[in-house]
Image (cartoon, grey):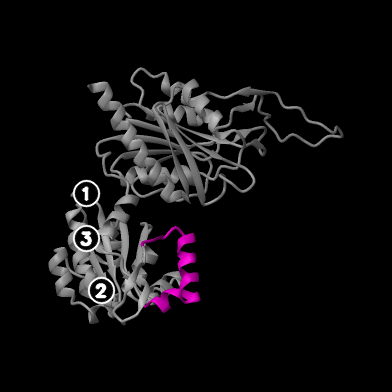
Amino acid sequence: MSNNLLTKKNIVLGVTGSIAAYKAAELIRRLREAGAEVRVVMTKAACEFITPLTLQTLSGQPVAIDLLDADQESAMGHITLARWADWILIAPASADVIARLVHGRTNDLLSALCSASESPLAIAPAMNNKMWENKATQENVEILTARGVQIFGPASGDQACGEQGEGRLLEPTSIVQELARLVVPGKLQSKKVVITAGPTYEPIDPVRFIGNKSSGKMGFAVAKAAKEAGAEVILIAGPVHLTTPAAVQRIDVETAQQMYDAVMDSLGSSDIFIACAAVADYRPKQVEDSKIKKSQQDQLQLSLTSTEDILSAVTKQENRPFTVGFAAETEQVVEYAQDKLRRKKLDMIAANEVGNGVGFEVDNNALNVFWPQGSQLLPLASKTQLARDLMTLIIEQYYAKNSTQNS
């Protein structure tokens, strides 16, 4: 196995009450071989199957067990641990813990940690095949999947109870490979990434504006993924109601002109620019000083003028950054995206269909990604995971371009 799959990633490993808990020892070793730092949280039931001392010795860190342990809370409390984690991985995950996660229970350390963390969560179920097939368990897994939790396995085969079927914990090497597939490579240390997100509002008068349905969720997810990769991130956000990703610098704007100005001000020494925002193409030529009153006329005519083209302005810079555009289309998605890629001289473009409940204002999406030498389809997934997959592609193409230019 490659020894750098999870370099500089902080992994909280949750171990629950399952006979497969003994495999946590091997899993810790494999995670550390892959470059991760590991801290272990055990449920009390897990301690009946494997000792905390064993996992502490292998991880090189104290094992946390009790939610109300004063010594543990003073060393690295569950809130601090929740913020420390790049990923939370529960392996093995029992049927009981899966149910606790669904219902948001917080009466043990592991479930409280998951509830307090914004870090992505992955679980590797392990239980008797009949417990796995139980309708309640299957419904719980469906709920967690819909929330963006990653499910690793389970595998099928002989079980400790003497039966056969689905429910075996995936082997530790497979779990590490599954996790590495989802994690953004930490290759953007010392790099600066500027990202735009959300809509712009172009005022008609003091109370009305021209806008669009962009929620900003994709741009915020991309900002988080860029930060996970180690970059310095500047997020220029239109009017949205979203929490700023941790350690990301946020600049709030409202109009296309304000977004243009913020991009130009932030662009200096940037390495990558990602234009996720749905910027208005036109704005009213004249903004009224007072509210336009409804008249007896059936029509109101507005004269519009084009806004600044942010993408074209960026690609015309002398020392331009690696530039990624987005294309939200209602039809002919591939054709329009490829045309925009060529016309605006972009390094990459991510295209998706919008409208009729797709694209805007939803939590899942799919992307067609194009660059001058190739393309890749990123299938339907949560915007959080889609952003990680997109960032991995951006990193690959950024370094491919730089190596070509420097060769």
Q: Amino acid at mark 3?
A: Val
Magenta stretch: residue 320 in it? Answer: no
Indicate the amino acid at tag 2.
Ala
| Figure check: 127 above or below 61 | below
Tag 3 or tag 2, which sits nearer the N-term? Answer: 2
In the displayed structure image, the side of residue 242 where residue 179 appears, left or right: left
The location of residue 254, given as percent across then percent down, is 54, 36
Q: Residues within 10 Å of mark 3 (few under 14, many from 20)?
A: many
Mark 2 → mark 3, Cα distance in angstroms? 16 Å
Estimate the x, y position of residue 222 in percent, counting from the top left. Answer: 41, 43
Query: Which residue carries the number 2 mark?
Result: 21
Q: Which quadrant of the view contains residue 148?
A: bottom left
Left or right relative to 272: residue 370: right
Give the vertical position of 247 relative to 300 (above or below): below
Please report whichever mark, 2 or 1, sits nearer to the chain's N-terminal start: 1
Dot 3 or dot 1: first in sequence order is: 1
**What is the distance, in whole Å, between disc 3 and disc 1 at their CAs?**
11 Å
Residue 158 placement (x, y as % from top left): 31, 74
Q: Magenta stretch: give its range.
A: 128-152
* Circle on res. 7: 1
Q: Is residue 140 left or right of residue 194?
A: right
- Residue at image mark 3: 38
CB within 8 Å, label 3 to label 1: no
